[in-house]
Amino acid sequence: MEKFIYMDYAATTPMHPEVAEAMMPYFTENFGNPSSLYTLGRNARGAIEEARDRIAAFIGADSREIVFTGGGTESDNFAIKGVAYANENKGNHIITTPIEHHAVLEPIHFLEKRGFAVTYLPVDEHGMVDPADVEKAITNKTILVSIMHANNEVGTIEPISEIGKITRERGIYFHTDAVQTFGHIPVDVNELGVDLLSASAHKLYGPKGVGMLYIRRGTRMVPFMQGGSQENNRRAGTHNVAGIIGLAKAVEIAEREMASEENRLSELRDYLIRGVFEKIPNVRLNGHPKKRLPNNVSFCLIGAEGEAILLSLDMEGISCSSGSACTSGTLDPSHVLLAMGIPAEIAHSSLRLTLGAQTKKEDIDYVLNVLPPIVERLRAMSPLDEAWKKNR
Amino acid sequence: MYSEKVMEHFRNPRNVGEIENPDGIGEVGNPTCGDMMRITIKVKDNKIEDIKFKTLGCGAAIATSSMVTEIAMGMPLEEAEKISRKDIADALDGLPPQKMHCSVLAADGLREAIADYRKKAVLAATTEGKKCKPRSKCKTKSKAKA
């Protein structure tokens, strides 16, 4: 295949060559266990502590507040179960939203089955949470609020700082899943007013299988992994040294390039959105038109099915994703789109294109050339073809 | 996750479209579930003389629709209505487990088109004045075209 255009950066990113280079020595000559006392171990320990300092500074935290984990999913599980089980004596109520990533929703469902009470806040048609609803939902039993920084499917950026003010005032722990924002838009734990923040390395050109959880000092948590005394007894298990070094390197690159990338990608994003609206009739933009991730474009191409569009784009060398039932692994379309009030028959037509470091304007032009005939072909093949033409 | 055969039928689906003045129409699925299919058939001498489909759905839904029309083309009705979901999936060198319902849709769509043809044939025979009441007792295997 001559053409290869990757537009699924929200799923994962290619590792930056500088990251790979920084990691290499920690697989080979610097292979020591950071818990060992001799020089080789101490060197590895020194490297991960340097990495911790850099990551802490990047989000306005203290180094002791950073715990390395096996990725975003582990960080979310740790934050939610860790707070829930350590604060059961205070209450059993958790507040979240129906548009969270499964890495948040599933541990919360797990707790719900074991006696915790959960409030799922409504979201508007853009997937936006209203801070006033958070305030209203708080009871004297509430121990945790977990709301994502930005949604992975539709790109909407939630009003985290406003919610953080409320949770601080009420003395309730606040967790945010920042997997989609960390390294892409400014993330500062004090500005956001969060007590816990999850991040993953592979979404910002780092390696897979490593992430971190920010835990504000004084937060009562039970440990997630039990075993050795690594990470101050909070997360047992030999450190993924190379992974942690890779995460820190990715953060270093983000520090350098984030601001200009944010501008460049926002422009490409808006160019793509405009182009699709100009060239394809009967399209709906998913997510907030302004308060959205700089690299996220999500549409419903009404009258065509998401997976069929995705496969057709793949034949043209374009990799992207969809929230249709056929790609969710269930019979239902994306829980995010349904929670936003989008009818199922429209949600099945969703397509997400997420841009990144390698995306150029020519790539967008290519997509704008191949996508319209694909949608037209699928719509023409549909038994509802006549119906939607009439409604146009 | 899809076989080459599925992708080939998705890329070049056979018999797409709608027959004008069809002898039978089968409509199955609904847009809320994400899959919808309409099969139209032309019947001659108790055989499927022509068959076309229109489908809204995923890759598997389109490939199974295409495959069922390819299998059924020219087949006697009694044989065509016995085409099972497994026959369709097998002809496509298999489907991923979560996609098996797509092959159900295709088989059901064809069966419904044949049932529609039979119903129309009976109704046509009735309106032509043949004594055919009550309908449940009517054994007429009419060859009349609707």
Image (cartoon, rainbow, N blue to C red):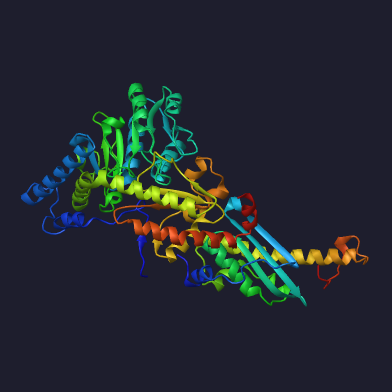
Horizontally, residue A106 falls left or right of residue B129, namely left
- Observer able to see residue A87: no
Which residue is drawn at the image coordinates 55% and 49% (left, top)? A346
Residue A158 locus on image (x, y percent): 39, 36
Q: Nearer the viewer, residue B51 or A42?
A: B51
- Observer able to see residue A139: yes
Q: How many marks?
A: 0
> Picture quarter containing residue A135?
top left
In the displayed structure, A131 sits above or below A375; it is above
Which residue is drawn at the image coordinates 45% and 24% (left, top)? A136
For the N terminus of chain A, give its image quadrant.
bottom left
Horizontally, residue B73 falls left or right of residue A100, namely right
Residue B6 locus on image (x, y percent): 51, 69
Q: Which of A217 and A322 is in front in this view?
A: A322
Q: Nearer the viewer, residue A123 or A83?
A: A123
Which residue is drawn at the image coordinates 44% and 52% (left, top)? A275
Q: Nearer the viewer, residue A378 or A58?
A: A378
Residue A231 locus on image (x, y percent): 20, 40
Residue A40 locus on image (x, y percent): 8, 52
In the displayed structure, A300 sits above or below B92; it is above
Horizontally, residue A189 falls left or right of residue A135, namely left
